[in-house]
Image: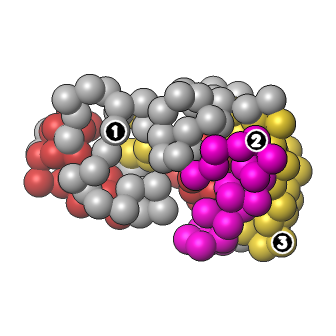
Amino acid sequence: MGLFDFAKDIGHRLFSEEGQAARKIEEHINDNNPGIKNLKVDYRDSIAYLSGEADSAEALQKAALMAGNIKGVEAVKVEGVKLPAGVSSPQAVETFGNMQYYTIQAGDTLSKIAQQFYKDPNKYSKIFEANREVIKDPDLIFPGQKIRIPTEH
């Protein structure tokens, strides 16, 4: 699935040994829980497998981005997550709410990305708010990081 593929060598380093990866990824998501109950993470061959119950498609999107933006994670599989009624598949999560996704490039800032998508660099906070679980500081983003871009209403 396109949304759930990531750059393995880019992101925050949370673990140094594969044996601690699942626990560290699970703790990371639970610390900023976007709405996943009974979250369990399995990690093997650079893939994070999530299971649990999502409160919404947005919660699952955020959890997938949180796991995928960790150094060492190449892909996130979410087939084990139960979705709310009306969201029938993980593929539906990729397009939920007309959300776009963007991979940060070298030289990008949130203002530059806001200019690209909204024609107004001052709307960077809209992007920051949509990605609070992934971006802790709007001045600290990195190339290869995948983020959500909310559509403008």
**Could you give the CA–CA distance between mark 2 and mark 3, rounded to whole angstroms?**
22 Å
**Could you give the CA–CA distance between mark 3 and mark 1, rounded to whole angstroms?**
30 Å
Whether tag 3 and tag 1 are in contact, CB under 8 A, the answer is: no
x then y, percent, for residue 141? 31, 45
The quadrant of the picture occupied by the N terminus is top right
Disc 2 is placed on an element classified as helix
Q: Is residue 23 magenta?
A: yes
Q: Which residue is mark 3?
A: 38
Q: Nearer the viewer, mark 2 or mark 3?
A: 2
x then y, percent, for residue 109? 20, 41
Q: Which mark is residue 142?
A: 1
56 or 8: nearer the eye?
Answer: 8
Q: Is residue 126 left or right of residue 27?
A: left
x then y, percent, for residue 13? 53, 46
Q: Is residue 25 left or right of residue 65?
A: right
Name the residue type under label 2: Glu
Which residues fall within the magenta stretch? 14-35
For marks 2 and 3 on the same chain, the one whose residue lies earlier in the sequence: 2
User: Can see residue 95?
Assistant: no
Q: Is residue 107 magenta?
A: no
